[in-house]
Structures are given as structure tokens and as C-alpha cells.
Amino acid sequence: MIESALRFGHRLLPQLVALTIILLLIWLVFPGFFSMEIQNGRLYGSVIDILNRGAPVALLAVGMTVVIATKGIDLSVGAVMAICGAVAAASSVRGDPLIVTLLLAIGTGLVCGVWNGFLVSVLNIQPIIATLVLMVAGRGIAQLVTEGAILTFNDPGLIFIGSGAFAGLPMPVVIWLVFGIAVTLLVRRTALGMLIEAVGINRRASTLSGIQTPLLLMAAYMLSGLCAAIAGLIVTADIKGADANNAGLWLELDAILAVVVGGTSLLGGRFSIIASLAGAMIIQAVNTGILLSGFPPEFNLIIKAAIIVIILVIQSPRVQAGVTFLSRKSVR
Amino acid sequence: MNQKYLPLIATIIIFIVSYAVCAAQYPNILSTRVVGNLLTDNAFLGIAAVGMTFVILSGGIDLSIGSVIAFTGIFLAVMLESTSIHPLAAFALVLVITTLFGAIMGAIIHYLEMPAFIVTLAGMFLARGMAFVLSIDSIPIKHPFYATMKSFYYKLPGGGRITLIGGLMVLVFAIGILLAQRTRFGTNVYALGGGAQTSALMGVPVGRTTVLIYGLSGFLAGLSGIVYSLYTSAGYSLATVGVELDAIAAVVIGGTLLTGGAGFVGGTLVGVLIQGLIQTYITFDGSLSSWWTKILIGALLFAFILMQKAILLLSRQNKRYS
């Protein structure tokens, strides 16, 4: 038990160290960073803001981790977010009850996942191209749903998802925490996680050893679609309107980045959802930190690129092999 | 007939058939003016797509080209506005910068063994960030040399014009085809796409080729940025967002396998023209909304992927029974 906890800590160490360093750096230039206060029964503060703003990427990262673990990739999540947001807004404008709106949006996300899963598992198309189809067409479909306009709604129930609070925490934070923990438990307390890793390492071998590979792949992409649907609901509810052009724009890249920063290899195999969530928070901490520390916003992307490169260089197999080589020498 | 030409031939047939369908509905689409505009309007996309073809043929991907085009545009605008440097010198300078930028990405991909997807993603952020740092405004370019360059064109019968940038795109494609089919570098690119390990064992200089491929892609993205700045006479750091996706779509529609190793630079030209044709048709129709472009290109992508799958499957069966 203790041993496995230690191993888990060792796995998460680089991400946690990086997150701590970034948070401390922000604290140095912006001393009020860690202060928090309770107003109207909910917490306010920069740290809470990072957790809240990072919700869409964190949710996407959960599904993306599982897809990447199967040696796939899902480029369509940003577009799926836009479609689901548009469907939810259209349904709310039509006057449907909240539960119907939510089910429609989530159902749409699952259908998108089935489409991607069908292309990858049944038609055997390379994931990067298979999901590219929906990435290119998705925003067009979302615009078709909203008919090119930004649909606004004022259903308080739907808006609550984006800006409400539960137990002192903003609703998006509660959603991604609960969802992330639920999926982690689902894959780690059953054999599911191991089967997913098996498919990612060698699809043919795992099929031959009796794993239902097509079913598992389909489920992975459906999970990714579900995550995108929830993220789309949050983004849409937050601005009280569906913007088919900008909702979730380039978030697929941030989500993939979160997974990679979290240390899951793009080549499939071993994965950690918790580490990906930490990766998502690292990305959001960088974004928020740059804003708080008063750098001109023009520098945002450059600093982000630099931090990504540093983290990636540390993780690169060549550099790690070199470090192992050097540390071995010093022991002798 | 050689099976590797099948996707290319299918692309060309689809282009001709769709052009005929469009022409049957709007006969004016056959006029040389439309043909000339098709080349001019898609020149920057076409030039960038040539670089993307080489990258994809080698089994990689380059997500940075849209940002590099925007960076080039804003760099030229700022240079020409605040210094008295001649545009040609500025062109040379920016081409050196973008080529080095691409080459460095290639070096990182090869020597640090990092996936091209993530490295060029960081490159995309970096180039866009540099563009923002140079200026966040849209800067017009009023240099008289730009007007001179725009006045060069070859007049076709019927009033159409092959402009300088449209002609440049065709020239880049011609050189690209030669480079891919007739040089050692081209052969190395194809070999690399077939399998990095195999090609290394065969004696292909993998590191040098990777650096050259991404350097070439950076160079062509820079050239595409110059063309874009000539086309719009302005530089804007938020321009050409998502051009990399259009370029990837053009490459795939042009019959190149995204896994690398198979495909043709010439096919990409047809892929670019098909995308241009869809846009022209929507403009002619006038009642269709712009989002149909995206949906149609997505559907086309899907159709081509399916077709490539079918061809692969058929060729495998032929091998089994022969």
C-alpha cells in the first residue's frame, strides 16, 4: 500500500514540482496571489480562478488522456464543444426543460464520439486524420445549428453550470474534480485501465489475447466526446450564449498539451489522468500568472511556448537517458 | 497501371467533374477571369501546402505554418514602415528567419526525439507570440515597390490575369514536383516516410533530411507570408489562423497518405484548387452560407480517406491472390 503510494508520488513528482515553481514565481511578482476570501457563500481568489478557468481544458484532458493511451488522438474536441454548446443553446431558446437540454447536448457529444470511434476502430483509419474530419466540419455544423448567429439564452439552470457555486466552489471546478475522480476510479479500480494500456502498446497483440479492441476504442472516443460535451456546456453557460466560431477554439491543442505535460506519451501505453489534470492546471497557472504579473499580454504566447519547450526537453527520452547515464557514473 | 497513381487520378477526376458540374450551372465559371482568380486567391495557401506535403510525406506534421505566415506579414509591414530598407532585402531577411525557425524545429524533433506534433505546436505559439510582440495592429504597407509588383501580370485571352503571386505558386509547385521526384533529397523524404528506422539502416541521413524538410517548410511558409502580404498589402498578427488545417486538408485531398511515404506534390495543387473551387461556387451561388465550405471540405476529406482505405485494401487482396 505504502509502496504503491510512493510509486504514485514519484510518477507525479515532475508535474507537482513544475506547478509549485510556477505558483511560487507568480507569488513572487504578485504577493496577493494566495489570498482567498468568502463572499456570498463562495470562495474568491486567484487560485480558485485558476481552478475555474482551467475547467474546460481539465475536462478535455481526461478524455484525451484515455484516447492518447490507446495510441490515438482526438483533434475534434474543440469543434465538438462548439456543436454541443450550440445544441444546448438552441434547445434552451426553444424552451425545452433543463434536463432535455442537458441530455441533448451530452447525447450530441456521445454521437460525435461514436463517429470518431467508428472511423478509428471499424474503418481502421489513423486517429489523427479520422478526427481531423470532424475538426474541419464541426464548426460548420455548429454554425448550421445556430444559423450563423450567437444564440443567447437566460435559463437560470443552464447558467448555473457556468457561474453557480456548490459547497463554496464554483460549479465548473466541482464538475471537473468529480468527473476526473470518477473516471480515474473507473479505470484504476477495474481492469479497464490496463486493457486500455494494452491496446495502446500493441493493438494486434491485445486483440489476439482476447481484448474487445473495437469496443474499447469506441468507448475511449465516446468518453472524449462526453468530456467535450460537458466542457462545451460549461463554456456556453459561462457566456450565456453559443458562439459557434470561438467556443473551444484551439482547446484541443491545450488539452493535448496538458496530457503531454502530464507525462503521458503520445505513442500510447501508460497513462495517468491525475497527472494530466495537473498538466491542465500548469497550463492555466501559466496563463493566469502571465496576466497577474503584469507582463504585456503580447508576451503570453512566447512565455507559454518557452515553458512548454523546457518541460518537453526535460521529458525527452534523449535527455532522460543522458541524466540516467550521468547519475550512474557519479554513484560509482 | 501503377496503383500508386490511383489516388492522384481520382483527385484529378473529381476536380474535373466538379468543375464541369459548376460550369453547367454557372457557365461564367469557365471564364479565364475566374481561373486567374482561383490561382491568385489561393496562392499563399498553395505555396505553404507544398512545404506541408514534404513534411507529411516524411511522416511528420507542421502546425506552425499559419503563425509563421502571420509573423512574416507583420514583420514585413513593421520593417517597411519604420526603416528605409528595400522590400527585396526585407524579403531575404524574413526568409532566412523563417527557414532557420523551421530548421531548428526539425533539429529539436530529431535530436531530442520529440513528436513533431508537439514541437511544431510550440512553434505555432512562439511564431504567433512574436507576431504579437512586433505589433497587435493591422499595419498597411504603402511602399511603391508593392504597387509595382502588383502591376506585373500576364493577360490571358478573355480578360483573365495570371498575377505575379499566382504564377509564383505554379512555379513553386513545379520546383516542388522536381524536388520530390528527381532529387536525392526527395527520395530520402519518401524513404523517411516509409519508416525512420528502415531508412536509417539503408543509409539515409535521417537527421540532415529531417532538418532540411522542416527548414524547407519554414522557407515556404515565409514565402507564403510574403505572397500574403502582397495579396493584402498589409500585415496583421491575427491573420491566417488555421491555415495549417487548410494545408493539411489540401494535402490529404491531393492523395497523400498522412502516414507518410506515399503521395505527390502535384496532387496537393489539385487539392488546393478543389478547396478554391468550393469557395468560388459558394460565391457564385450567393444564397449558400459560408459554413457550407467547412462542412463540404470535411465531407471531401472523409470521402478521400475512405477511398485511400479501399485502394489499400484492394491492392493487398491483389497481392494475396497473385
Image (tube, rainbow, N blue to C red):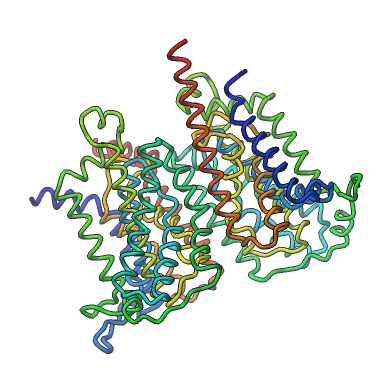
Percent x, y for residue B295?
55, 53
Percent x, y for residue B13?
66, 34
Percent x, y for residue A284?
39, 66
Q: Residue at x 27, y 89 (%)?
A: A40
Which residue in the rendered view is the most extreme toward the bottom? A40
Quadrant in which residue A81 is drawn: bottom left
Q: Residue at x 18, y 53 (%)?
A: A186
In depth, the one of A135 and A201 nearer the eye is A135
In depth, the one of A302 and B116 nearer the eye is B116
Q: Residue at x 30, y 56 (%)?
A: A62
Percent x, y for residue A277?
30, 59
Judged left or right of residue A59, residue A178 is left
Q: Residue at x 52, y 48 (%)?
A: B120
Judged left or right of residue B223, residue A128 is left
Which residue in the rendered view is the most extreme toward the left? A1
On the question of residue A281 being in view, the answer is: no
